[in-house]
């Protein structure tokens, strides 16, 4: 059997002999960080924080979708007429012991009018229309 060549003491952040984790920063007495690992982690953290700030700013900037009850009613009527004019898929729903076809609201319609969906769903349910969201 040949003699083993030099094998590094540390692999994947662990000491090969003791199998214990080795610290990566030089301030704690471990191996110096030559890969820039800490800098990468710091940048990732900053990017994540920036995304959260942007998302929170967007949420905070949103106000009510419609100014007053008259505008809300007009928007509901407009959405309903737009929904009726679209080609919609159908799904089956049980009513008692039989199946009934119910028109489904298309996903693109929900995505395009997401800010109004909360009050539009209530409006559709109040009108007792058979649409399924």
Image (cartoon, grey):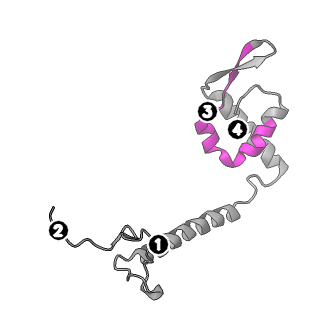
Residue that lies at the very extreme toward the top in this rendered image: 98
The crowd level at tag 3 (other Cα within 10 Å; few <14, some 14-19, many 20+) is: some
110 part of magenta stretch: yes
- Can you tell which mark lies on residue 53? none
Looking at the image, is mark 3 or mark 4 nearer the viewer? 3
Do the residues bearing badges 2 and 3 touch, measured as CB atoms within 8 Å?
Answer: no
Whole-angstrom CA distance, mark 3 to mark 4, is 13 Å
The label on residue 106 is 3
Mark 4 and mark 1 lie on one chain; the one further toward the N terminus is: 1
Q: Residues within 10 Å of mark 4 (few under 14, many from 20)?
A: some
- Which residue is label 2 attached to? 3
In which quadrant will I find the N terminus? Answer: bottom left
The picture places residue 103, in percent across and down from the top left corner, at 68, 24
Query: Mark 2 or 3, which is nearer the eye?
Result: 2
Determine the CA span between mark 2 and mark 3. Answer: 70 Å
Looking at marks 2 and 3 on the same chain, the residue that comes earlier in the sequence is marked by 2
**Residue 55 x %, y %:** 61, 63
Q: Determine which quarter of the picture holds residue 84.
A: top right
**Residue for badge 1:** 41
Reply yes or no: does residue 47 show up in magenta.
no
The C terminus sits in image quarter: top right
Q: Residue at x 67, y 61 (%)?
A: 59
The reply to whether discs 1 and 3 touch (Cβ–Cβ < 8 Å) is: no
Q: Earlier in the sequence, mark 2 or mark 1?
A: 2
Q: Is residue 112 left or right of residue 41?
A: right
**Label 4 to label 2: alpha-carbon separation:** 80 Å
- Quarter of the figure with residue 35: bottom left
From the image, tell me which residue sits under label 4.
79
Q: CA distance from mark 4 to mark 1?
A: 47 Å
Q: Main secondary structure of the magenta part?
A: helix
């Amino acid at each position: 059997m040949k003699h083993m060549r030099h094998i590094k003491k540390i692999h994947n952040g662990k000491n090969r002999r003791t199998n214990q984790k080795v610290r990566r920063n030089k301030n704690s007495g471990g191996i110096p960080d030559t890969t820039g690992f800490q800098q990468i982690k710091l940048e990732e953290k900053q990017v994540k924080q920036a995304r959260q700030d942007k998302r929170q700013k967007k949420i905070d900037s949103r106000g009510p979708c419609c100014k007053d009850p008259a505008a809300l009613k007009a928007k509901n009527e407009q959405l309903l007429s737009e929904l009726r004019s679209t080609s919609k898929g159908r799904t089956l729903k049980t009513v008692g012991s039989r199946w009934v076809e119910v028109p489904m609201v298309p996903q693109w319609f929900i995505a395009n009018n997401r800010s109004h969906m909360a009050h539009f769903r209530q409006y559709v349910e109040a009108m007792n229309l058979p649409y399924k969201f």
